[in-house]
Image (cartoon, rainbow, N blue to C red):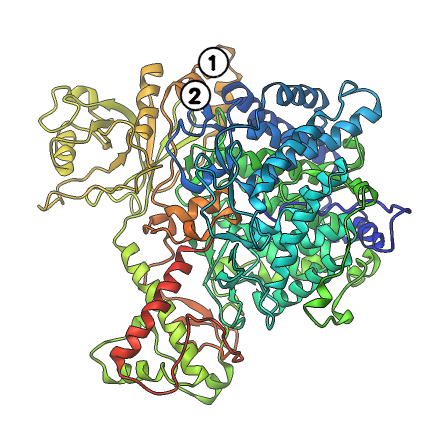
Amino acid sequence: MSGAGSRGCGSPVPQRAPWSLVAATAAFYLVSATSVWTAGAEPMSREEKQKLGNQVLEMFDHAYGNYMEHAYPADELMPLTCRGRVRGQEPSRGDVDDALGKFSLTLIDSLDTLVVLNKTKEFEDAVRKVLRDVNLDNDVVVSVFETNIRVLGGLLGGHSLAIMLKEKGEYMQWYNDELLQMAKQLGYKLLPAFNTTSGLPYPRINLKFGIRKPEARTGTETDTCTACAGTLILEFAALSRFTGATIFEEYARKALDFLWEKRQRSSNLVGVTINIHTGDWVRKDSGVGAGIDSYYEYLLKAYVLLGDDSFLERFNTHYDAIMRYISQPPLLLDVHIHKPMLNARTWMDALLAFFPGLQVLKGDIRPAIETHEMLYQVIKKHNFLPEAFTTDFRVHWAQHPLRPEFAESTYFLYKATGDPYYLEVGKTLIENLNKYARVPCGFAAMKDVRTGSHEDRMDSFFLAEMFKYLYLLFADKEDIIFDIEDYIFTTEAHLLPLWLSTTNQSISKKNTTSEYTELDDSNFDWTCPNTQILFPNDPLYAQSIREPLKNVVDKSCPRGIIRVREESFRSGAKPPLRARDFMATNPEHLEILKKMGAASSIDAEDGLRFMQEMIELSSQQQKEQQLPPRAVQIVSHPFFGRVVLTAGPAQFGLDLSKHKETRGFVASSKPYNGCSELTNPEAVMGKIALIQRGQCMFAEKARNIQNAGAIGGIVIDDNEGSSSDTAPLFQMAGDGKDTDDIKIPMLFLFSKEGSIILDAIREYEEVEVLLSDKAKDRDPEMENEEQSSPENDSQNQSAEQVSSSSQEVDLVDQESSEENSLNSHPESLSSADMDKAVSISPSEQTSNPTENHETTNLNGECTDLDNQLQEQSETEEDSSPNVSWGKKVRPIDSILADWNEDIEAFEMMEKDEL
């Protein structure tokens, strides 16, 4: 999402000023991607493209139709339980819920998607519903950022296409700017958030009571993320240009001006989180992913839409710094703004997948191809892009909430290169969504890409963006009822017309950039490149860039991941002390620690790295004690493996990660608690027994059902209403005795997850499940046979009713508050949220500390990371008050005491400023 927007720039508009050449040329190189570049892959036939486009339409109908049937007017659909998510009626998910304002979020977010997909009648009906049912005056605290990009952007995008359709003369003839009036009403409701000394908005606001009133329950926050404050200009400027009310654009410009002024001057980078009152950076690391991403995006797009040269100057200044410090092809790694040669973390988040698309708009194609290909290799390994993954491509956070950023970059790379390879990439995305995320009542987010388990959520951005980009990828110009190049996409993929650039231009275009920095015009590209010179005259250009990256994930030792201190390496110097090697009883190690407090820049950076490694090692050791989650997959009719529940493992019994999965029908044991010899052994013989938690040890339950002939067991929590949404992943311990006699697999489900199975039994009597460490592929042949049978139509409807009657299944395990925030849009997270305690979860697993970590030596060979030397970065004066290396060697106790503050800072970073 953030980062998910506007790369369609627009056709040449003669009446625009010279800056229009950039927008016009950008549009040209996006849409005139010549067929010259198709030699790298087999061209896709028109028939196959139409088939895939129709498949996208059917998928959208499945998602949108189920939302309207089972969730509307709620904000979002819960696709596992077939009901709407209403804020306050479901257990709180923390900051993820800040996007929900009881304003039918998914419907508003989907308005312009309906028109792009040529569903004009449905669009007209949807607009009438919005005007009739949506209330923007609710007593609810919402994210300013999310409300702006999703709701304000959705209303403006809907208005833009409504007036377009009205001009065509067939649809929307009754429309009289009603959506625009709603957008203006919402804009005024958001303005009080800007009542700060800096002009940066508060991160949250009460739609009814505003800020800082007792009834508002908000207004005490001090921090916001850079993207939260810097992703307003497109929507607010469009609102001003549409209505003539200049105040909206003025406020958004002031926020952008302040962020630019507060950039780190030596590196030209911005941090992730900033104090909205003082302008001090709270989180001082910088990247292109969560927390910053759409700030960069909106600088470039504001130039395209508004024609203010200062926005392009700022973007190019930032982009130069990004490519200098953050870009380590094909990776994009966060760095410290004061020490940009020092990496701030060893993993990447999924939101950076938008960046190749932004690079296409910039005209920098080679790195866009490289990063996109690396991301695609990760997807091919895990079916989806994990929320975060390490530099050696292991899963760091395992969730995937059906994010559209990769699909967006795929679309724009195809438009820029014309390479049919990207059509095949899009085809893979469609297949994976249908195969792994599709459920009877929509599409469910992936709880864990390793197990294939689902989460009971379908975010509005899935309909706003994913289907839009996938459809446009396969559509020809004649398949779309309007010229998409006359519009710019926002970060939520909403469409704003480029003619706004010449409308109501009453905003002063003072060039404030030059006040803050010496500008080198040679650094700035004032026009986008013509496609005739964009690539060398080589039809295999894109393929030649991708080829070296084909095995980058499988080999797990891509070159350039770790910056190597090459001079020291060549000179034979001893490697720096690694955290895993440290021994407190070793005098040499203690002496090295003392040196880390000296004035040497090398020793100081070794100290920083050592602290990072100590924290990561401690985290890994805690994770090592945690068993990974397991999966319970319902494989019988009418589910066919489409519903996957996250299950807690047992520390005894059959290890599903080492043995073949267990498949069987389920049966309830009697007594249900399983604490004595079963009275219905014939019912559980050869089946998977359902037993209730409580009254005896788990191992005792396992022995009793095993003695009755069960082939496995599922323990369902006796705490009614319990859910992994509000509780960490649970793993069952033994009874303190030898449990080697237990040979069957045992899994644990919370009450809400267990209710899915229990409700299915009540409806269908016979329910078959699969117990495994990872969900298995569905059986399409059996599913097709069942679906082709007319007598099953009513049963399929019953399946939805079963899901609807069952309680919520929010399969969010102990992913911690910071991952929840990433699942929404981490840009909207305040620093207070970022500092919350974090529990270690299996989904955050990176690796076993005993693994051999590989990287690349100077000869390009894979070597043990423990023997690799780090590169010495150029020493810059660090103005951060948190890091102060003394000039004298001090006692070890004093050094360690002074490190406490630094360690806390790194721990906060590990929780992630997302």
Task: Give me the disc on residue 69.
Answer: none
SS type, badge 1 = helix
Q: Is residue 376 visible?
A: no
The residue that disc 1 covers is 792
SS type, badge 2 = loop
Can you tell which quarter of the image residue 56 is in? Answer: top right
Disc 2 versus disc 1: distance between alpha carbons?
Answer: 8 Å
Can you tell which quarter of the image residue 528 is in? Answer: bottom right
What amino acid type is highlighted by mark number 1? Asn
| Residue visible at 53% across and 78% down in the picture | 876
Chain-order first, disc 2 or disc 1: 2
Q: What crowding class fits label 1: few (fewer than 14 Cα within 10 Å), some (14-19), or many (20 or more)?
A: some
Report if the CB atoms under discs 2 and 1 are less than 8 Å apart.
yes
Task: From the top left corner, tell me how far across and down residue 521 is, in percent.
Answer: 78, 70
Question: Which of these two is toward me, 567 or 374?
Answer: 567
Q: Is residue 258 above or below residue 182?
A: below
The residue that disc 2 covers is 638
The reply, left or right, for residue 358 in relation to residue 62 is: right
What amino acid type is highlighted by mark number 2? Pro
Q: Is residue 704 visible?
A: yes
Question: Which of these two is toward me, 671 or 839?
Answer: 839
Q: Residue furthest bottom?
A: 571
Task: From the top left corner, tell me how far across and down residue 672 is, in percent.
Answer: 17, 23
